[in-house]
Image: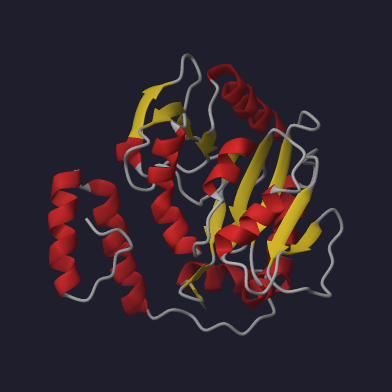
Amino acid sequence: MKENKLTVIISSCDSFSDLWDGHIKLLERYWGDRQTDQTILVTDKPTEKAYENVTILAAGEDAEWSQRLRAALDTVRTEYVFITLDDYFLIQKVDNQRIDELIAIMDEYQLDYIRLFKHPKRATREQLGNHRGVHRVDNTLYYCVNMYAGIWKIDFARYCADCSLSAWKFEVALPEMAQRYHASLAVDKKKDFVILDVVRKGKLLHRSSRYLKKHPELYQGDRDVNALSYEMRLMIQTFVARNTPMWLHKRIKKVLRKFGFEFFTED
């Protein structure tokens, strides 16, 4: 890892502090050799928790999600920032050389953002030169920029976080922000940062519940597990979002809304 190129930010809040121990244990297990400028966990309320190699920043109890992110970004000294969320648990080794390569690609092509999550596939465009697995992204489509793990140019990240929005509304607003900024976006389709999605709607997902039972040292909280019916609905929504043409996607969403499905985008 090239020193002074990258800062890691873990976005969180006090109500998710039961996830911090597990998140940071796995971060140290699978990316403990990161040579980043600093690792910041940003939350709302002051806390007595403390971790080696991690700075905890309390941005204020009244701060919206985007405002907390902006507070962390304002402390960053590096050109790039790696942003991830508290309930995304890293479960495979991260290759520092590959992270260096991605930053070099961002330098070469003047990219503002590269996400380490292949969806949405419909936004993926041509490969960048000879860089296998790295493709340009259409910045006009929903979730072209999203809050799965990604590397951001600090100026673009600060531009996007200069607002007062919840996490859900922030993510929905990102494509419009990217267009206004004329952001140059890309996706790394390789599995370079493999996560376990732990929580949805404040409850554990069944897959994460099974994982945490196998690794009890990661979690000592008391969250309920989501109903299987909810997760089935979530699977259907995800399938529709990822695997249908946009014109059909919009029609299916209208039908699903009649059956009680909720979507954060209007069309």
Horizontal side of 129 relative to 120 (left or right) equals right
Expressed as whole percent of the image width and height from the top left, the position of residue 220 reads 69, 79
Who's the residue at 56% across and 51% down the image?
161
Of the pair 101 and 58, the residue shown nearer to us: 58
Colouring scheme, one of rainbow, by chain, secondary structure, one colour: secondary structure
Horizontal side of 137 relative to 104 (left or right) equals left
Expressed as whole percent of the image width and height from the top left, the position of residue 76 reads 74, 44
Who's the residue at 70% across and 57% down the image?
26
Q: Can residue 223 be seen in this view?
A: yes
Who's the residue at 46% across and 32% down the image?
183
Picture quarter with the N terminus: top right
Who's the residue at 71% across and 48% down the image?
74
Expressed as whole percent of the image width and height from the top left, the position of residue 83 reads 61, 48
Q: Work out which residue is located at the far top of the displayed protein and give it.
A: 130
Of the pair 84 and 44, the residue shown nearer to us: 44
Picture quarter with the C terminus: bottom left
Expressed as whole percent of the image width and height from the top left, the position of residue 34 reads 77, 41
Q: Is residue 105 above or below residue 212?
A: above
* The quadrant where residue 217 appears: bottom right
Q: Is residue 71 above or below residue 198?
A: above
Q: Is residue 153 visible?
A: no
